[in-house]
């Protein structure tokens, strides 16, 4: 995002909408006027300040950035679509649509590791640290995830070096593992978390068994680990893409 210093009147109303708190006051120009300026190093191009409609002089605008800066907007703006996956947002739609896709099968757990939210943002060099730690325990990353498309080597977890300095509002690493590997994955997250400059939250997705028990809850409870239940219920929306999947 950028602010036109000529038309900006320095009211500061946009500052309340900045997800990264990177809009500040500046003074300059021929009349030494006060205007607002965005720290481009910290801005994630989410566009929330502009979409809020708070600027009375229309001084906020989103320039078209080239590579690699362009990834900031595609990860941070929920309306932007990734050219690699053709899906908007930070991850895939599969977690929310498992009743249609049947992606997470019995005996397996889907893992979604979100980095940068709330209100912190994440640099890709921190994302690479997590990728590398997971690659070391032979995790296979989700191909349809836009972060996976930024990997230079899936076996080592190394990302394209051109993107390492870029910052996004948040992003999600996704993969599937057998249920008996869930604890090893959590241990890996705990170890690498100490090296990060951002926040990391883990979601574990499992199908209920025939008795409506949640396998992930049983696994975590047995290990004495804290967890909270979170659920999203679809109401039959979507297109059946997997033969034999149950539509609810």
Image (cartoon, rainbow, N blue to C red):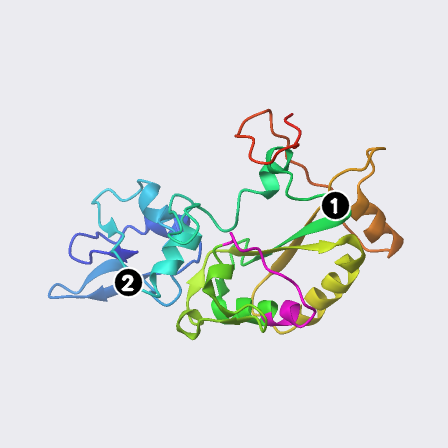
> Looking at the image, is 192 positioned above or below residue 38?
below
Residue 139 in the magenta stretch? The answer is: yes
Q: Select label 1 or label 2 by which is in front.
A: 2
Q: Which residue range is magenta in the image?
A: 132-145
- Which numbered marker is on residue 172? none
- Give neighbour class at mark 1: few <14, some 14-19, many 20+ (Cα, 10 Å): few
Q: Nearer the viewer, residue 156 or 2?
A: 156
Residue 132: image quadrant is: bottom right
Helix, strand or loop at disc 1? loop
Viewer can see residue 44? no
Residue under the point 64% across and 33% down: 99
> Looking at the image, is 76 positioned above or below residue 192?
above
Q: Position of residue 81 (x, y in %)?
A: 39, 47
Which secondary structure is most common in the magenta stretch?
loop
Question: Residues under labels 1 and 2: Cα distance?
Answer: 40 Å
Q: Quadrant of the N terminus?
A: bottom left
Residue 32: image quadrant is: bottom left
Residue 84 in the magenta stretch? The answer is: no
- Give neighbour class at mark 2: few <14, some 14-19, many 20+ (Cα, 10 Å): few
In the rendered image, which residue does mark 1 sit on?
228
In the rendered image, which residue does mark 2 sit on?
66
> Looking at the image, is 115 positioned above or below residue 41?
above
Answer with left or right where residue 89 lies relative to residue 132: left
């Amino acid at each position: 995002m950028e602010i036109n210093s000529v038309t900006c009147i320095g009211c500061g109303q946009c500052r309340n909408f900045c997800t990264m708190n990177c809009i500040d006051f500046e003074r300059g120009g021929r009349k030494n006027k006060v205007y607002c300026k965005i720290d481009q190093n910290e801005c994630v191009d989410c566009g929330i300040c502009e979409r809020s409609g708070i600027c009375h002089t229309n001084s906020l605008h989103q320039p078209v950035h080239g590579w690699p800066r362009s990834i900031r907007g595609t990860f941070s703006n929920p309306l932007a679509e990734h050219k690699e996956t053709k899906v908007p947002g930070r991850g895939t739609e599969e977690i929310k649509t498992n009743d249609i896709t049947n992606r997470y099968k019995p005996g397996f757990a889907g893992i979604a590791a979100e980095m940068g939210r709330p209100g912190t943002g994440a640099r890709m060099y921190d994302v690479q640290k997590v990728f590398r730690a997971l690659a070391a325990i032979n995790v296979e990353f989700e191909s349809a995830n836009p972060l996976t498309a930024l990997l230079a080597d899936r076996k080592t977890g190394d990302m394209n070096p051109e993107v390492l300095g870029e910052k996004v509002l948040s992003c999600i690493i996704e993969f599937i593992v057998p249920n008996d590997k869930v604890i090893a994955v959590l241990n890996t997250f705990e170890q690498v978390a100490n090296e990060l400059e951002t926040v990391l939250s883990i979601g574990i997705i499992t199908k209920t068994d025939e008795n409506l028990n949640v396998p992930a809850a049983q696994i975590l409870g047995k290990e004495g680990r804290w967890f909270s239940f979170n659920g999203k219920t679809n109401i039959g929306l979507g297109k059946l893409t997997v033969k034999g999947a149950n539509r609810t």
